[in-house]
Amino acid sequence: MNRIESVKNPKVKQWKKLHTKKEREATKTFLIEGFHLVEEALKKEEVIKELIVSEEVSIPASLNVDNIPLTLVTKDVMKAISETEAPQGVIALCREQDYSFDESWKKVLFIDAIQDPGNLGTIIRTADAAGMDGIVLGEGTVDLYNSKVIRSSQGSIFHLPISKGNLLELLNVYKERNIPVYGTSLQNGQPHKEIEPADSFVLIIGNEGNGVDKDLLEKTDKNLYIPIYGSAESLNVGIAAGILLYHLRG
């Protein structure tokens, strides 16, 4: 077991660099914070590379960390590498998950340029709860391993495959198999309840401000919207994704 007392330690500096997307992409690693996220990551083999624990914190006996390198740090070091206001005293260095698009996925969520990390995390958590087979992140979408995305997902990033890809190209896979593809559009859509649930479908959720890219909308079978009964201009994209996913899967 290692122990680090100085915030100037080279390992501490390296951990802090992982707060940036550039360093995460370069090293294929990222940090997670808190006991719940660590517990979820432990359910998958070889995700956690190293566990970083404050010397003031005890690891619950329920967490099996026997085969994971452990580093004890001081309260000041933990504060230096944490991105939360009230650190729980446990951080894990994790390997990025390498998922490729799988043509066998039948219930799939395509995400087109979602930029708010809280929204993306919420959508991933909702897709997990709705039993989706996989998620594809399109160009312009916020980094999956952004700390706010991870926290908002509540560990769901470890539960279902999430890949990256060209959404326009991947839509052809489903069009060729006659699996319905649904876009989301307030202007040129139809009420979502007019669509019957199905065992297979693709749903495309778009950017918070601009919606789904028009080139994608032109390739869908139908475009859907959720009726607004009050005075709100629109629904939050995470809420909308939840309503549509649960309706489409039945």
Image (tube, helix red, strand yellow):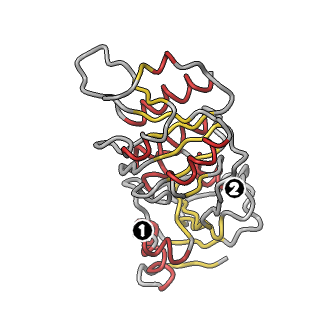
Type of residue at label 2? Leu
Task: Please give the residue where the numbered disc 1 appears in the rendered image.
Answer: 19
Choose top left, top right, bottom left or bottom right for residue 246.
Answer: top right
Q: Position of residue 210 (x, y in %)?
A: 30, 43
Q: Residue at x 37, y 46 (%)?
A: 213
Against 213, residue 242 (above or below) is above
Choose top left, top right, bottom left or bottom right for residue 66.
Answer: bottom right
Q: Is residue 6 left or right of residue 96?
A: left
Name the residue nearer the viewer: 106 or 116: 106
Q: Position of residue 80 (x, y in %)?
A: 40, 70
Location of the C terminus by quadrant is top right
Q: Secondary structure at mark 1?
A: loop
Q: Position of residue 38 (x, y in %)?
A: 61, 55
Choose top left, top right, bottom left or bottom right for residue 106.
Answer: top right
Name the residue nearer the viewer: 45 or 195: 195
Q: Position of residue 46 (x, y in %)?
A: 72, 65
Against 163, residue 31 (above or below) is below
Please tell me how many numbered marks the rendered image carries.
2
Name the residue nearer the viewer: 182 or 249: 182
Classed neighbour count for the residue bearing mark 2: other residues with Cα under 10 Å, few (<14), some (14–19), many (≥20): some
Task: Please give the residue where the numbered disc 2 appears in the rendered image.
Answer: 42
Classed neighbour count for the residue bearing mark 1: other residues with Cα under 10 Å, few (<14), some (14–19), many (≥20): some
Q: Residue at x 42, y 79 (%)?
A: 7
Location of the N terminus by quadrant is bottom right
Q: Earlier in the sequence, mark 1 or mark 2?
A: 1
Type of residue at label 1? His
Q: Is residue 14 left or right of residue 186?
A: right
Q: Residue at x 54, y 58 (%)?
A: 165
Measured Cα–Cα span from mark 1 to mark 2: 21 Å
